[in-house]
Image: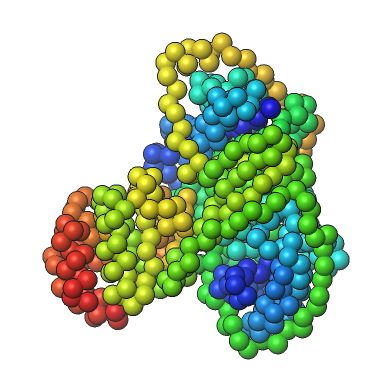
Amino acid sequence: MKVFVAVKRTLDYAVKVRVKADKSAVDLANVKMSMNPFCEIACEEAVRLKEKKVAKEVIAVTVGPKAAQETLRTALAMGADRGIHVVTDMRHDTELQPLAVAKVLQALGAKESPDMYILGKQSIDGDNNQTGQMLAGLMDAPIAAFASEVSVDGDKVHVTREIDGGLQKIDLGLPAVVTADLRLNEPRYATLPNIMKAKKKKIEEIKAEDLGLSLEPHVQYTSVEDPPVRQAGIKVESVDEVISKLKETGVL
Amino acid sequence: ASTLVLAEHAEGAIADSTLSVVSAAKAIGGDVTVLVAGADAAKIAEQAAKIDGVSSVLAAGDAAYDHGIAENITALLQSVQDSKSFSHILFAASNDGKNIMPRLGAKLDVQPVSDILEVLGEDTFKRPMYAGNAIATVKSSDSVKLASVRITNFDKAAAEGGSASVEEVSGPGDAGKTTWVADEVAKSDRPELTTADKIVSGGRGLKNGENFEMLYTLADKLGGGAVGASRAAVDAGYVPNELQIGQTGKIVAPGLYIAVGISGAIQHLAGMKDAKTIVCINKDPEAPIFQVSDIGLEADLFKAVPEMIEKL
């Protein structure tokens, strides 16, 4: 089968987030960018399906600026076979919204007809947690969001997914959309030989406007601010003090 | 405005999360309608009708809507929306809500707003981005507004006092795309993390899963608290993911939060900084958790926790 994996270039998860002084947005100038951690998990899962000979071809897709090609190269170095880069300069944490990305993925899917779409459950910039679910909705396909275990058996996908308070097992028909949660796998690091090999893999570039879709945001981000600061309290020396302070303030 | 709230329920009872979503709906203004879906809908709808501020309740009694299968519930919501044309549809920002809302958004060509923290107007909301390190004010231009509600940011509506009418509704039923196999939900007498008033939470400092036992004992001593964990402890395999508190886990806002052996990574703070009182026990005085704690104890947790258990 053919697998689509969507990957996004985001602020690196270890970078401190700074809001611009004019409260217009988060400052993304000169900060380290990486593949969104949940997309890494999605990519790893797709590559594992290929290693298990379940998937014949893994196609990594990204929607983003020119520089997002680096993220696609990372996916190719992890083991994806080829890449599709839909190029747009829309700001990817506020202007390029999940509905638009889902429409792009649906349009690409209509050309390539993958059997399975694997996405991260959310990106760590916009934190919307929507794109996979929306793609499934547009395609009228089944969704397994927050997957922690995936196996394919003929034309059925067995998924264990995270639900509130525990786990749920479901079976889906194909084509299906799966979004990756934290425990699905531990993504590999791309090795140097694989990074070299990835340079030769093909990336198709498509201008977003050539897809003939409306990608205009439906939601305007009118301001972005720092969260309220929580004041540090006191340091105490002993367990007795902890207990007496809690009793003083009526917590215990 | 007229707002539809998708109710959450478990074991025949309406969930507390629904009460918080009703409060968010009240903040928008106008009529509030609650949709209860599932085999037990009729019985749960009676409870929903008593929630203060709810003007009507829709009950879709069909087992196809149990287990939160997104395709089935979305089709029901769509058919209800087709006939009733609500201005807003609200969900709890739970795994179920997060699973269903975007699919409905795709069907209605609407861009939903995730995790609202505050209602500023009929079309304007506050929401967190970047793991809560930035708070955005957003304005939706869609004709129907879809939003998921961060339940710890809204007080619960009173469960009693209302007398809404109940109407039966039906949708297309089972879409036949997903087969439910099993739910494995841990049965416990402890409160749910997201609604617990007291939480004891452990990090990598606990060193292994067995050591979490003492956190359960401490939670018992506090009068029946819940136990949580940092992502580091989950990643290390000490405890299952459903215990995870943080941006990628559960968002909690208890009265008392005791962080044991947790350094306080940004992603963890995003999940617990709304607790009323935060206590931390950590041997590293430089740990960022001290900067958000009301009471910080610099100590070896393996001495301090047993001592606390003994003295409470």
Which image quarter: residue B57?
bottom right
**How many marks are shown on the rendered structure?**
0
Give the percent coordinates (x, y) of residue A131: 64, 43
**Front in this rendered view, residue B229 or B126:** B229
| Above-or-below relation of B29 to A198 | below
| Above-or-below relation of A118 to A47 | below
Q: Is residue B130 left or right of residue A160?
A: left
| Screen quadrant of the C terminus of chain A | bottom left
Give the percent coordinates (x, y) of residue B61: 76, 71
Give the percent coordinates (x, y) of residue A11: 47, 37
**Front in this rendered view, residue B186 or B248:** B186
Whether residue B32 is visible, yes or no, is no
Write the residue at 66% across / 59% down: B68
Whether residue B213 is visible, yes or no, is yes
Which image quarter: residue A110?
top right
Single out the residue that lies furthest toward the left. Answer: A237
